[in-house]
């Protein structure tokens, strides 16, 4: 049981998964055996010195790229990879020259391409499809770890009918080498020494004067190595390596990936079966220590000694060829085994106390549990009127989804979603009130008082939105059409407490505030938003930025309530927030030119749901920002 819990925790709980990742990253970054610099792959780097030649930095001068491709072709490169998205026009004559050059290059050529809406919009995709012939296309997307954002895998591409294979796989295809169409963990090529990079890197503006022998029969990759462009976090960041390793340019990540596939280098780490076996052995060791019956202190000291020996040995052993073995899972297995055996060998009273605490910890944060243990009167059979901040969540179209999936698949998806969401809620100190299918109701400021409950609720809602969007995209890639998660946040007075009897209790909140909170979540679908907060919540968090949706009369209510949606970082950075405030004020004041201003703003932000909502209202002759809901 201890081994099972340890293994599943490390693989499915973000906190433990991150710790295991850090343990792996330290070994990769600090203890990888040295390798000589690659003799097969060359990087042609577009750097600051390159861009200083041109009048504009972006897009990169197309005439320069054309001349660069011709030069490398003449120098005898084996294949050429261009990691630059050609997704928008520049100067017409230079665009035509590059397009012509692409068709004339004699050496095999492949060019970055993407169908991801997060990277290119429809106009960019249309231009790219016309500019880059299909046979040259290679998907430039990266496969990042959802837990910490690090790039850990080679993205294979071909996730849809119109997506080509990934950048690294395309290079191997041109070399007539087959590669697996699956996520492959990257085996990072270490530096030969502190001063030398894993791959030769030459500035793009110097290529013409460099010896042909440096490029002849080499895989030549062209891409940017600028300080703020196309950089990604890698496992090498964990021990403070150079910027190019910690936040690595995309072209270097592709080079590592191609090198691995080219040399048939296996993925780092060991098989899942071997990981399970090592975790199981950790549990066995914990049992053997406990069977000595020397007492809990002896067991803990012995366990810590074995753990330190295992961690230090694994770290140092990696540089001498020892594989990336799991560290956290066997450690947890050993600790859990010692703890469980201590309980079974005569600690019945502590077993009961730990069981009760563990059961409640699934619904409230560990800190709340500790406070409840110290003040058990908080769980008395009574109700108390208090100000509470509520979060309601619901997955759009979940009923339809449940009809399409088998019971087992539906259960797996829902459990994974709820597990991730609950971890976030508990992290922010929320109390999980109940699950209603896929919907979650949670509250803040009860049972333990939280002076910043509104701030906790809003920041929790934003993190839930980030998690839910990432989860939705991941499931959609697997063919599971899970919808967006809509979130409502509301603050008000409610009666909170345990309702029931001494034999069966339900800790929950009652009152009209709960109904308002639920309806706040539901109105998201009318505005196209994912998070909706009421005025009563927003007024308590003056340090956060919101876009006002309108003054909304909810179904069954007579008075309007101000509804808001939190401002995302990209909305602040791209100017949408400022533009929306201006347009909203004009609509609110019913100015004659409000529609013209709105249409002008939509030219810059065509995908904003609130702009679309108000455009439909104004075109229908409805003025102002007071909105009367006819449904929940």
Image (spheres, rainbow, N blue to C red):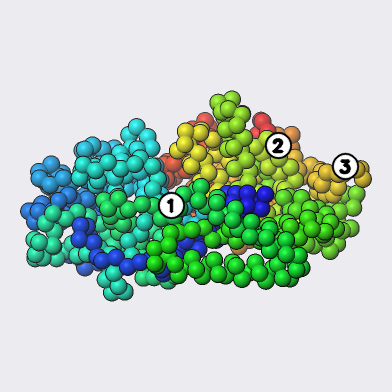
The earlier-in-sequence mark between 1 and 3 is: 1
Q: Nearer the viewer, residue 456 or 615?
A: 456
Question: Which percent across, then down, holds residue 92?
Answer: 16, 46
Query: Few, some or many C-alpha atoms within 10 Å of disc 1 (few <14, some 14-19, many ≥20)?
Result: some
Q: Nearer the viewer, residue 64 or 583?
A: 64
Image-quadrant location for residue 201: bottom left
Q: Which mark is residue 144?
A: 1
Query: Few, some or many C-alpha atoms within 10 Å of disc 2 (few <14, some 14-19, many ≥20)?
Result: few
Q: Which residue in the protein does label 3 denote? A: 504
The earlier-in-sequence mark between 1 and 2 is: 1
The earlier-in-sequence mark between 2 and 3 is: 2
What's the residue at 21%, 68% (across, down)? 49
In screen coordinates, is 454 left or right of 151?
A: right
Of tags 2 and 3, which is closer to the observer? 3
State yes or no: discs 2 and 3 in contact (Cβ < 8 Å): no
Question: Which percent across, then down, holds residue 372?
Answer: 82, 59
Q: CA distance from mark 2 to mark 3?
A: 19 Å
Residue most extreme to the right: 502
Q: Which mark is residue 436?
A: 2
User: What secondary structure is marked by label 1?
Assistant: strand
Q: CA distance from mark 1 to mark 3?
A: 45 Å
Residue most extreme to the front: 292
In screen coordinates, is 434 left or right of 181?
A: right
Image-quadrant location for residue 458: bottom right
Query: Few, some or many C-alpha atoms within 10 Å of disc 3 (few <14, some 14-19, many ≥20)?
Result: few
Q: How many marks?
A: 3
In screen coordinates, is 227 left or right of 24?
A: left
Report whether residue 318 is seen: yes
Question: Which percent across, then down, holds residue 198?
Answer: 28, 64
What's the residue at 83%, 43% (across, down)? 506
């Amino acid at each position: 049981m201890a081994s099972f819990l340890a293994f599943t925790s490390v693989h499915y709980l973000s906190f433990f998964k991150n710790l295991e990742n850090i343990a792996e990253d330290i070994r990769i970054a600090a203890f990888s055996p040295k390798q000589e610099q690659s003799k097969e792959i060359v990087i042609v780097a577009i750097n600051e010195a390159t861009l200083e030649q041109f009048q504009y930095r972006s897009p990169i001068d197309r005439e320069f790229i054309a001349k660069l491709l011709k030069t490398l072709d003449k120098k005898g490169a084996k294949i050429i990879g261009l990691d630059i998205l050609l997704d928008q026009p520049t100067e017409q004559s230079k665009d035509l020259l590059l397009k012509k050059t692409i068709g004339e290059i004699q050496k095999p050529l492949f060019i970055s391409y993407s169908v991801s809406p997060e990277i290119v919009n429809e106009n960019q995709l249309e231009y790219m499809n016309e500019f880059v012939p299909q046979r040259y296309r290679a998907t430039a997307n990266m496969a990042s770890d959802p837990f910490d954002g690090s790039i850990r895998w080679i993205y294979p591409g071909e996730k849809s009918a119109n997506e080509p294979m990934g950048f690294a796989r395309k290079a191997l295809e041109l070399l007539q080498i087959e590669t697996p169409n699956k996520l492959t963990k990257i085996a990072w090529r270490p530096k030969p020494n502190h001063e030398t990079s894993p791959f030769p890197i030459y500035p793009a503006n110097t290529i013409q004067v460099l010896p042909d022998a440096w490029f002849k029969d080499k895989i030549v990759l062209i891409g940017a190595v600028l300080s703020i462009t196309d950089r990604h976090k890698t496992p090498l960041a964990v021990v403070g390596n150079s910027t190019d390793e910690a936040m690595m340019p995309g072209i270097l990540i592709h080079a590592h990936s191609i090198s691995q596939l080219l040399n048939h280098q296996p993925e780092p780490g060991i098989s899942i079966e071997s990981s399970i076996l090592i975790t199981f052995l950790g549990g066995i060791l914990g049992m053997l220590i406990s069977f000595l019956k020397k007492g809990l202190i002896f067991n803990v000291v012995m366990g810590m000694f074995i753990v330190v020996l295992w961690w230090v040995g694994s770290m140092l052993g990696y540089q001498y060829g020892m594989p990336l073995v799991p560290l956290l899972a066997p450690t947890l297995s050993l600790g859990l085994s010692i703890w469980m055996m201590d309980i079974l060998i005569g600690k019945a009273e502590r077993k009961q106390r730990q069981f009760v605490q563990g059961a409640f910890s699934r619904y409230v944060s560990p800190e709340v549990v500790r406070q409840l243990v110290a003040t058990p009167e908080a769980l008395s059979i009574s109700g108390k009127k208090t100000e509470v901040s509520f979060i309601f969540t619901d997955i759009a179209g979940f009923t339809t989804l449940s009809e399409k999936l088998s019971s087992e698949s539906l259960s797996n998806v829902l459990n994974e979603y709820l597990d991730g969401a609950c971890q976030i809620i508990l992290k922010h100190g929320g109390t999980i009130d109940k699950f209603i299918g896929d919907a979650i109701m949670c509250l803040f400021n009860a049972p333990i008082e939280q002076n910043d409950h509104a701030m906790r609720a809003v920041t929790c809602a934003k993190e839930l939105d980030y998690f839910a969007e990432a989860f939705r995209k991941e499931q959609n890639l697997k063919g599971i059409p899970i919808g967006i998660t809509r979130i409502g946040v509301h603050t008000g007075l409610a009666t909170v407490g345990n309702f029931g009897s001494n034999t069966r209790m339900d800790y929950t909140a009652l009152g009209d505030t709960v109904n308002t909170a639920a309806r706040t979540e539901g109105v998201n679908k009318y505005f196209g938003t994912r998070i909706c907060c009421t005025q009563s919540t927003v007024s308590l968090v003056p340090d956060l930025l919101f876009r006002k949706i309108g003054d909304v009369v909810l179904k069954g209510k007579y008075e309007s309530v101000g509804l808001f949606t939190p401002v995302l970082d990209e909305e602040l950075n791209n100017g949408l927030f400022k533009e929306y405030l201006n347009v909203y004020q004009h609509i609110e004041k019913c100015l004659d030119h409000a529609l013209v201003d709105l249409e002008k703003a939509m030219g810059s932000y065509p995908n904003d749901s609130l702009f679309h909502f108000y455009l439909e209202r104004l075109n229908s002759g409805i003025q102002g920002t007071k909105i009367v809901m006819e449904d929940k």
